[in-house]
Amino acid sequence: MLVEHLRKQWRSREATTPIDATMRFAPEGLVLGAGTLLAANSPSGSPTTQMTCGDAARLSALISAAYLRPTPPTALGHIQCALRRRHAGEDDIAQLHLALTGLGPLARPREAARRLFMADGLIQAGADPEMVQRLTTEARGDQAVRKFLSTGGGFNPLEPRILAGNGRPSGEWTRVGGALARLSVSAVKRLAAFAADYLPYVGRVAPPVVFFSVLLIPTNKSLRVEGSVFELKRLHYLWYSDGTALFLSYDGADGRRKQLTAQLSGGGLFRDPAGNVVARKLSDDTLAVDLPAISPDLVKKDEPNLCPTQKPDRPGGKESDRDFEDRVKALINPKPPTPRGFGYWLPNPDNGGQVVFDDCQRQTGILFEIKGQYGKIAAAALKYGFTPDFEDDWLKQSARQVAAAGPRPVYWIFKEPSAAEYAQKIFEAKDNGRERIHVYVLEN
């Protein structure tokens, strides 16, 4: 059987091939895991101008198999840009594009490498990449793969089944309600884990974020949970944790204010007066609101958005530095980039103040600080050993950003190599969490 054959091949590959926990460039193309080729160079050694639909589907399925989560659409674009830049000899920019995928290192490299190898083998044997992606993101392992191979694709582990004893035939597929109503138990657990990573810590108040048309609202286990998301038709929410009613209001398409009251029912589900599920209480008490179930007007076209609302940045800086910042912003969020003079603000858990970042990648929540012209002073400081005036500012700024970022990655992007080298030097000398800051150079 194919699966048994792939298992034997994996044992041989595992014994002879080092495991790469992050994507790297090899002569044949981009590889991950135990030498699995994600994207190949053309026979001429150069990347193709545009990925075919089949190439993109295969790549998306392989990444999903490795990371056990859906592949962000922007990740595919950044990988293709990385391949082009690599062929052009622009290795620094290529590496930056790989970083901007937001994929990061594999959590359990050997297990992930095995899944990746098996998924690649299935696709090479003729399996549909989309089906492989749906199977692997549910992490059902070989049982799901065997079922898929034996039934020709009729098995779909993403769809929940009706539990026995509810008056309907057990095992029947169900499509009742919105997206939150259809989530399987494992999917709800992953959504709760995501909320725990990106939302509140004890003692701090984090803003709500939108993830694949689901608004995640942190509660911090408060009695009264209330707030507004102005970019979502001025959506306002109110919930008392000791009650059952969730109050929602927003601007309708006709300009009038719409109101909705949802009642908490079994399974942590909030239902509107018609019985439709519009929200769900996760295991950590985070509220997950199904935006399309309330109104199609609430669905933003640039989902997912894992960033707070953009606000005007502090004034100042040279125009040339602003030009460089805009150039980097166009790489981080191509459609559309963060406007000139705007940044993203997060609360500082240490003092209750606000900390600004130059940019935030909407698909991943990665935070960015962009630095322009410091090169001459930084080069002199490295050469002669004196302390430049900006060192104290950088150390204080980086400390604030690490505290405010929480679990989110932080990237400092520099225009000049000497400034990046100096930042890396002081971050390593005075760590205090600064090892989480990734330093990159993007030269003109």
Image (cartoon, rainbow, N blue to C red):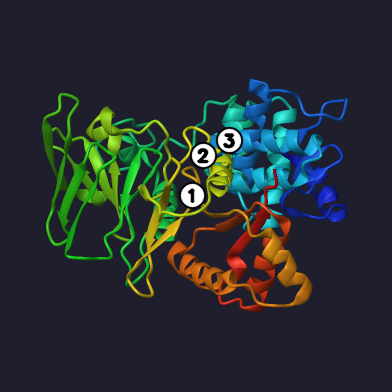
Q: Are marks 1 and 3 in contact (CB under 8 Å)?
A: no
Q: Label 1, label 3: how many angstroms apart (C-alpha)?
A: 31 Å
Q: Are marks 1 and 2 in contact (CB under 8 Å)?
A: yes
Which residue in the structure is indicated by mark 3? 133
- Image spot of residue 405 (x, y percent): 46, 62
Quarter-wise, where is residue 430 in the image?
bottom right
Q: Residues within 10 Å of mark 2 (few under 14, many from 20)?
A: some
The residue shown at (68%, 24%) is: 51
Give the number of marks.
Answer: 3
- Image spot of residue 345 (x, y percent): 38, 56
Q: Amino acid at mark 3?
A: Gln
- Image spot of residue 65 (x, y percent): 62, 42
Q: Earlier in the sequence, mark 1 or mark 2?
A: 2
Where is 48 relative to 162, above or below? above
Q: Amino acid at mark 1?
A: Asp
Q: In this image, 285 relative to 320: left or right?
A: left
Q: Label 3: state its secondary structure.
A: helix
Quarter-wise, where is residue 60 in the image?
top right
- Image spot of residue 422 (x, y percent): 69, 67
Which residue in the structure is indicated by mark 2? 333
